[in-house]
Image (cartoon, rainbow, N blue to C red):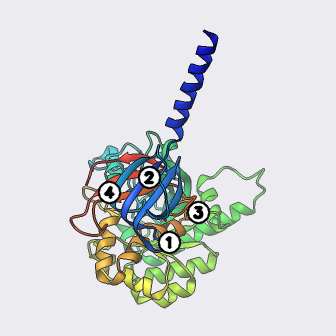
Amino acid sequence: MKRIAISALILIAGLAGTSLHAGIAIKAEQVHTVSGEVIPNGIVLVDGDRIQAVGTAEEIDIPADYAVHETAVVTPGLIDARSVVGLAGMYNVPDDQDQLDTSAPIQPGLRALDAYNPSEGLVEWLRSLGVTTLHTGPAPGALVSGQTMLVYTRGDTVDDAVIRPLAGVSFTLGAGVSRHFESPGTRSKSVAMIRQAFEDARAYGRQDPDERPSDLGNQALLKVLEGELPALVHANTAVDIMTALRLAEEFDLDLVLEGAADAYLVLDRIREAGVPVLLHPTMTRTGGESMNAAFDTAAKLQEAGIPFAIQGGYEAYVPKARVVLFEAAIAAANGLGVDHALAAITLNPARILGLDEDLGSIEVGKQADLVLFDGEPFEYVSRVCKVFIAGELVSEECR
């Protein structure tokens, strides 16, 4: 009896090992690696949460115990370079609108981490359309609206979803700030208030760490001044873009421009400053400070050699967010081209956000965030049919 029991345990353990460790194989008519050439008749092997092998069907043998998924096209998981999803909700009611606090124009101590709802319907919606990673946080509209974060579009709690709890501090330049606050009323006052906030943070940083009082706002701005966090400056007009560049030079900031509708008017200045751009959604509504937004701005940034990514951004109306897949498709058709458009929502944002060691392309050793399409990704009739995050199938409804 003892020998039989031991044998049974060995068999059970062996079966459990097979169940736990068996990988998956993606067989695709095209593998868009983004970091390299498109692979026709390709295979991607996944072991656990990592990409194990990438190549043609002639080069790679699929292990017998691997689950096989066949598709027309596979791409890396899509990355929304800037969003408010998870703070702004799909129902557009006060209970799901945490994207902007208007009690004061400068609030760097606010954290997206404390408001993000991973169960928000918009998170699931974006995931089903191929978005596996979000850079989300406070919306533009305040001079300093708070701290952003990086999350996967999965998980039941914020702890399950979080990649990086602090990704940057959000700033806004432009006349639009005055819609939410009595002061500042002008651009000059806006910049003076931001400059004073930085000077106050500098003074705070010069105090003895053991004696200075706790101040969440100054602590956050000090991280920006010391280069620990980037300054994410939303600026659409050429005037405001140039102001952002001057502030970055004055305070030695790690600057990332957001929005940047007028970027094509100051391409040389942006390139000389070495500043990346999280470009407005291609189909953003034109008006006000974004009146010069254009379908071909992405192509002009690409031609100028400026690092950029396309963001989903924020809409004040339902459904509150744009889909970067659709935004990139329009940019592709307006001079950017398919390859660069796909990079603008995968590898480019991964590089700008410091995630490219793990995400953004289909390469051996990287995390297995993969999107399976039933046709070319930017074709109107193509659908996302399966989405994997870290090797886990998280969506399988064709949309």
Tell whether label 1 touches label 4 (CB within 8 Å): no
Q: Earlier in the sequence, mark 3 or mark 1?
A: 1
Which residue type does callout 3 highlight? Answer: Glu
Which residue type does callout 2 highlight? Answer: Ala
- How far is mark 2 from mark 1, CA to CA? 20 Å
Tell me the mark number nearer the camera, choosing from 3 and 1: 1
Q: Earlier in the sequence, mark 4 or mark 1?
A: 1
Count residues near mark 2 (Cα–Cα under 10 Å), then give few for <14, some for 14-19, many for 20+.
many
**Element on which disc 3 rests:** loop
* Residue at the spot of label 4: 129
* Residue at the spot of label 1: 35
Position in image of residue 59 (x %, y %)? 49, 64
Q: Earlier in the sequence, mark 2 or mark 4?
A: 2
Q: Nearer the viewer, residue 167 or 155?
A: 155
Count residues near mark 1 (Cα–Cα under 10 Å), then give few for <14, some for 14-19, many for 20+.
some
Q: Which mark is residue 25?
A: 2
- State how many labels appear: 4
Q: Earlier in the sequence, mark 2 or mark 1?
A: 2
* Residue at the spot of label 3: 357
Tell me the mark number nearer the camera, choosing from 2 and 3: 2
Tell me the mark number nearer the camera, choosing from 2 and 1: 2
**Element on which disc 1 rests:** loop
In the rendered view, would you say 332 is above or below 17?
A: below
- How far is mark 2 from mark 3, CA to CA? 22 Å
- How far is mark 2 from mark 4, CA to CA? 21 Å
Position in image of residue 273 (x %, y %)? 56, 84
Which residue type does callout 1 highlight? Answer: Ser
The N terminus sits in image quarter: top right
